[in-house]
Amino acid sequence: MYSIKTMNHIAQAGLDVLPGDRFQVGAEVGDPDGILVRSASLHEMEFGPNLRAIARAGAGTNNIPLDRCAQAGVVVFNTPGANANAVKELALAALLMASRNLVGGAAWVREQAEAGVDLSTAVEKGKSVFAGPEIMGKTLAVVGLGAIGVLVANAAYALGMEVYGYDPYLSVETALRLDRHVHCVKDETELWQKADYITLHLPYNESTKDTINAQVLAQTKPGVRIINLARGGLVNEAALVEALNTGRVARYVTDFPSAGILAAPNVTALPHLGASTPESELNCAVMAAQSLKEYLLEGNIVHSVNFPDVSMERGDCARVCALHRNVPNMLLKLTTVLSQGGFNIEHMTNKARGEYAYTLIDVSGTVSEADLAALKAVEGVFRIRLIQD
């Protein structure tokens, strides 16, 4: 029986993935084998010795200490693509809000009504203040062509926009889903110079922090419109406020409000609505729970953010799962321990991701605690798991 602690409300459809005969699931679970989390921060959380996996029901993992987890042998999963359609739809709405001041116009109409003026007369006189350009025929720069960025790029092209995309890590799978009319560029500078609109769909890390900064804004067209539904830190706040004040940026639509940004003109700030749809919450919960189930029951890793994805069909053999550093001779050391224990290796697979690696080894025979202790003693091993049922 595996115990799973829920750190936020998780859709019931996700909880249903974890059968009651194999999993105990709930917010009150102590010393869990796994954690299901959405937005709760785990950076200050002390992890118990039994914790083996954390599944984030969402794409971003800024609320989880990835390296600390890896070095404790805790695999962290996310749910790429599960909320992609929800964010894509909001991005399309944001494109329109960046062009046509819909939010400001709606607020103004309500103010006129509350003031008791004749609305039919007032709107005809005042509507010109809220006019804005059409998006058809304009150029959109999509920065980040992951699951969300590809959907946004394709949808924007379908709406009649000229679309340019940039992603230095564009995968073959993603490229195949990208409309052939989307221009993929290798130099970000080309994006900034061509774009009438810029939309960001990047993860937030040290390399992407301040992607939009003063130097970038100096290269953009005057009156560019920027959309950020990804992470607040992708945009340098001080540089953006200056550009909004001078009119260099005509409008900024963001899902990450702050007092500094709201002090600037022409800002539409939303309360982090990107994945706030019932469909998205259900999809994320199901995918997160499926990742936990597959790892805990079979040892397979799918959609991890701190270890490589590794899967191998399960037979009748005992399965040894080794989370370890990506260093020379590690496989030799592990297989030597097993051969000295008299085990025959039936199947084996290994992959690395940066400094971390994962190895699955199926062996014939019964693996004892002494055998596991010998494997755990290998230098560079974070955790050894045995799946024998």
Image: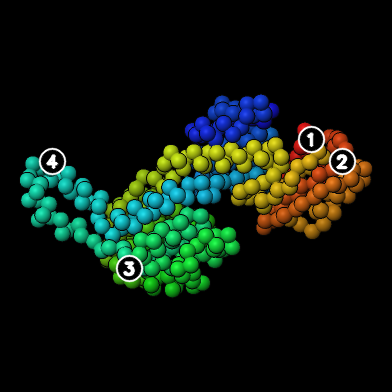
Of the two numbered discs 2 and 3 on the same chain, state the one appearing first in sequence.
3
Q: Amino acid at mark 1?
A: Gln
Residue, x 82% and y 40% (percent of image)? 317
Q: CA distance from mark 1 to mark 2?
A: 10 Å
**Circle 2 crowding by C-alpha within 10 Å: few under 14, some 14–19, many from 20:** some
Residue 193: percent from the left, percent from the top?
39, 73
What residue is shown at x 85% (from left), y 47% (from top)?
346
Residues at circles 1 and 4 in contact by the CB criterion of under 8 Å: no
Residue 187 seen in the figure: yes
Front tag of 1 and 4: 1
Q: Give the residue number, with chain letter if any, for mark 3.
A: 137
Task: Indicate the amino acid at tag 4.
Answer: Glu
Helix, strand or loop at disc 4?
A: helix
Q: Is residue 372 above or below residue 194?
A: above
Label placed on residue 114: 4
Q: CB of mark 1 within 8 Å of CB of mark 2? A: no
Q: Earlier in the sequence, mark 2 or mark 4?
A: 4
- Disc 2 marks which residue? 364
- Residue 250 position by quadrant: bottom left
In depth, the one of 38 and 141 nearer the eye is 141
Q: Could you give the CA–CA distance between mark 1 and mark 4, rounded to whole angstroms?
A: 70 Å
264 or 282, which lies in front?
282
User: Which mark's residue is nearer the viewer, 3 or 4?
Assistant: 3
Question: Circle 1 sits on which residue?
Answer: 388
Nearest to N terminus: mark 3 or mark 1: 3
Horizontal and vertical percent for residue 190? 43, 73
